[in-house]
Image: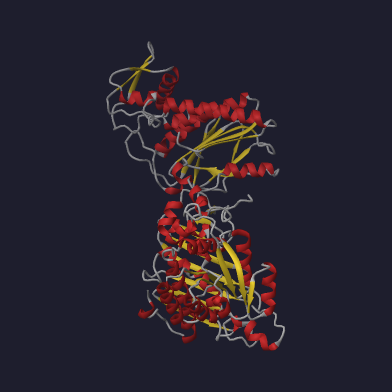
């Protein structure tokens, strides 16, 4: 089990489920997952610069060093020397910068990975395009819908390869589940539920008070929109994927109920997105209770798909064999009665099972696959179809949800921001 | 037989246990090849298509004779020709001299579904008994159950109907057959006397020594009006019927 899906050819793994061609047809950005050999790539490597070497930057670095042979980290940049030093220890020999403009001037850098605080994504990404660099930028795209839209348009016009780190787009278990949902196998989608529950203050240690806003940027609206841009942005794609359409309107409510420590972003939110066909998608988040953890569920008429657990629960599960139960009891030394006698069993009703695993072998969350795909796209100079559109709308709707809560209104995405 | 078949028995030797189970499975497949009217090459399919008389093998000939005897003993309510258009009974004649059979008309369709299940279950029970298994339970499609000996930890096997899980039926070297509409409410048992689908607000279980007779009786009783129950059961000593609500 050491060679699990996600650590070898992703499409090969999907092919084992007979899904490769179907998944490629539905999710065209996966063409970029083809192996180098499949795409005629030789031994070329992408020289990468990391802008922002905090936890997320180091996470991507670890993946690149271990699982992305097409990528080579050659430069690192951060204004916070603690993070820069830690990152430098991971890649001895990489050039170090404390000004991203200098890194962008570095001709040895082909592409940059932008893992800065949210409010810097827009400026850094646009400067990278100006410098002729390909860009992998973490989600959410930007701090405002207008900036997201501008990033999208400028990214397209630049001709550079441009990815946003929506790793679920490359998570095998999500892809297979979505393919099943979109095939109609489980009837129409009637609801989409997303939630993310934690029980912690969401703070990071601050060595000196003047660094509070720099380090805990997630807590301040000048830099972040809190749960919506840091958490909801991951999950709002689920509804668009499952329904193959984008939300029509959004409303919600948020407040600070527990962590009243000077933060400006909400510590609990409940948002409802409504699609053109009337189906609702919810996003809820609380950081003062973690019992139910993270959940993403597609509710169909005939089944519920639990995306993170990669399981399907049928609405009408077949009755468990009474004999099977009796065998389990005998093995446990129990004298029991079996409840199964009845009128004739119908073979047609026993073709499925409850809690069916979709892809039990799947490992990881798509972060490795998306980085592999980015590097391969840089090498082949082929921007995957739809990937940017999906990312744009995920960011735009997370920001729109935040705005709806703050204004206390039902909002629609303005026409000028629709692609 | 297009149904679920489960065998539960306790054996200290896994290989022997698997061989016993394999033997039962093989027997069931062979019976199906004889009795299924859905297999084009089966004798029953051939008989349903035959023009004039048709010579049949010993197993099928025995079944045809027994089924006709059971039809008479159940006052006409167990009838393997029940799916045929309402008409003359008996619907076929057995010719002992050459083990051949002739249907009364081309419209007669013989269906051994209930018989074959009970017959195979009875043979499976005998096979397990002969293999010196004194603790086995066989389930054919949930509607037909046969017990060999007792539960490993009890004096009998305890079986509860899906329709009424509170009810407990004790089996010990005996069988249970349940007929009815089940929880789905869909009826598939035809009253051969009037040709109408039998509909009742309960399922009907029959217990007794032979799995085959249990099967025959539960089918006949469900098809028959309640006023006929006692008359039908009077011919079958040791068999009891129970209504399951």
Left or right position of A139 against B201: right
Q: Residue furthest top?
A: B97
Left or right position of A145 against A336: left
Q: Residue furthest right?
A: A207
Q: Is residue A35 above or below residue A48?
A: above
Which x, y percent locates residue A386? Answer: 42, 66
- Find residue A269 and report its image quarter: bottom right
Front position in the image: B104 or A235: A235
Residue B90 visible, this angle: no
- Find residue B78 and report its image quarter: top left
What colour scheme governs how the chains and residues are painted in the rendered image of this protein?
Answer: secondary structure
Front position in the image: A360 or B45: A360
Q: Quadrant of the N terminus of chain B?
A: top left
Which x, y percent locates residue A114? Answer: 55, 74
Which x, y percent locates residue A165? Answer: 52, 69
Front position in the image: A12 or A178: A12
Front position in the image: A407 or A132: A132
Q: Is residue A102 above or below residue B47?
A: below
């Amino acid at each position: 089990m050491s060679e699990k899906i996600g650590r070898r050819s992703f499409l090969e793994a999907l092919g084992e489920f007979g899904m490769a061609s179907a998944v490629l047809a539905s999710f065209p950005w996966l063409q970029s997952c083809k192996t180098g050999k499949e795409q005629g790539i030789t031994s070329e490597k992408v020289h990468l610069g990391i802008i922002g070497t905090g936890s997320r930057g180091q996470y991507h670095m670890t993946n690149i060093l271990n699982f992305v042979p097409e990528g080579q980290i050659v430069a690192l940049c951060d204004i916070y020397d603690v993070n820069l030093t830690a990152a430098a220890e991971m890649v001895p020999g990489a050039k170090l910068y404390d000004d991203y403009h200098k890194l962008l001037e570095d001709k040895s850098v082909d592409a940059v990975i932008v893992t800065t605080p949210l409010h810097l994504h827009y400026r850094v990404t646009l400067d990278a395009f100006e410098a002729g660099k390909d860009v992998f930028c973490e989600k959410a795209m930007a701090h405002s819908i207008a900036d997201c839209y501008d990033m999208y348009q400028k990214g397209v016009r630049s001709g550079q390869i441009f990815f946003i780190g929506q790793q679920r787009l490359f998570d095998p278990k999500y892809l297979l589940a979505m393919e099943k949902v979109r095939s109609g196998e489980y009837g129409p989608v009637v609801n989409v539920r997303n939630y993310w529950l934690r029980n912690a203050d969401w703070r990071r240690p601050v060595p000196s008070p003047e660094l509070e806003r720099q380090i805990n940027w997630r807590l301040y609206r000048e830099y972040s929109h809190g749960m919506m841009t840091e958490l909801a942005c991951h999950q709002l794609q689920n509804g668009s994927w499952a329904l193959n359409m984008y939300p029509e309107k959004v409303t919600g409510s948020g407040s600070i109920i527990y962590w009243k420590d000077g933060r400006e972003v909400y510590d609990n939110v409940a948002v409802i997105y409504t699609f053109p066909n009337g189906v609702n998608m919810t996003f809820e988040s609380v950081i003062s209770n973690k019992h139910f953890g993270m959940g993403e569920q597609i509710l169909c008429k005939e089944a519920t798909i639990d995306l993170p657990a990669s399981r399907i629960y049928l609405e009408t599960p077949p009755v468990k064999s009474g004999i099977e139960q009796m065998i389990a009891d005998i093995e446990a030394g129990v004298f029991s009665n079996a409840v199964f006698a009845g009128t004739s069993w119908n073979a047609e009703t026993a073709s499925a099972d409850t809690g069916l695993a979709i892809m039990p072998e799947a490992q990881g969350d798509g972060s490795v696959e998306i980085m592999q795909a980015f590097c391969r796209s840089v090498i082949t100079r082929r921007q995957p179809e739809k990937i940017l559109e999906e990312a744009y709308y995920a960011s735009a709707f997370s920001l729109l949800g935040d705005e709806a809560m703050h204004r206390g209104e039902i909002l629609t995405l303005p026409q000028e921001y629709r692609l | 037989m297009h149904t679920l078949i489960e065998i539960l028995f306790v054996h200290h030797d896994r290989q022997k246990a698997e061989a016993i189970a394999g033997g039962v499975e093989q027997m069931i497949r062979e019976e199906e090849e004889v009795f299924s009217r859905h297999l084009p090459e089966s004798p029953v399919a051939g008989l349903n298509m035959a023009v004039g008389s048709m010579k049949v093998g010993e197993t099928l000939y025995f079944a045809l004779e027994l089924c006709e005897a059971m039809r008479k003993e159940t006052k006409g309510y167990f009838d393997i020709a029940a799916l045929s258009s309402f008409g003359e009974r008996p619907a076929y004649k057995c010719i002992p001299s050459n083990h051949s059979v002739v249907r009364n008309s081309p419209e007669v369709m013989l269906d051994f579904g209930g018989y074959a299940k009970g017959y195979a279950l009875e043979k499976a029970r005998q096979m397990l008994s002969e293999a010196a298994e004194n603790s086995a339970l066989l389930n054919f499609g949930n509607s037909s159950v046969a017990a060999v000996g007792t539960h490993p930890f009890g004096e009998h096997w305890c079986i509860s109907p899906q329709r009424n899980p509170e009810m407990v039926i004790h089996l010990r070297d005996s069988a249970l057959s349940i007929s009815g509409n089940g929880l789905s409410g869909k009826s598939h048992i035809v009253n051969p006397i009037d040709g109408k689908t039998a509909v009742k607000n309960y399922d009907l279980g029959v217990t007794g020594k032979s799995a085959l007779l249990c099967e025959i009786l539960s089918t006949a009783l469900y098809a028959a009006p309640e006023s006929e129950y006692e008359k039908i059961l009077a011919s079958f000593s040791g068999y009891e019927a129970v209504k399951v609500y």
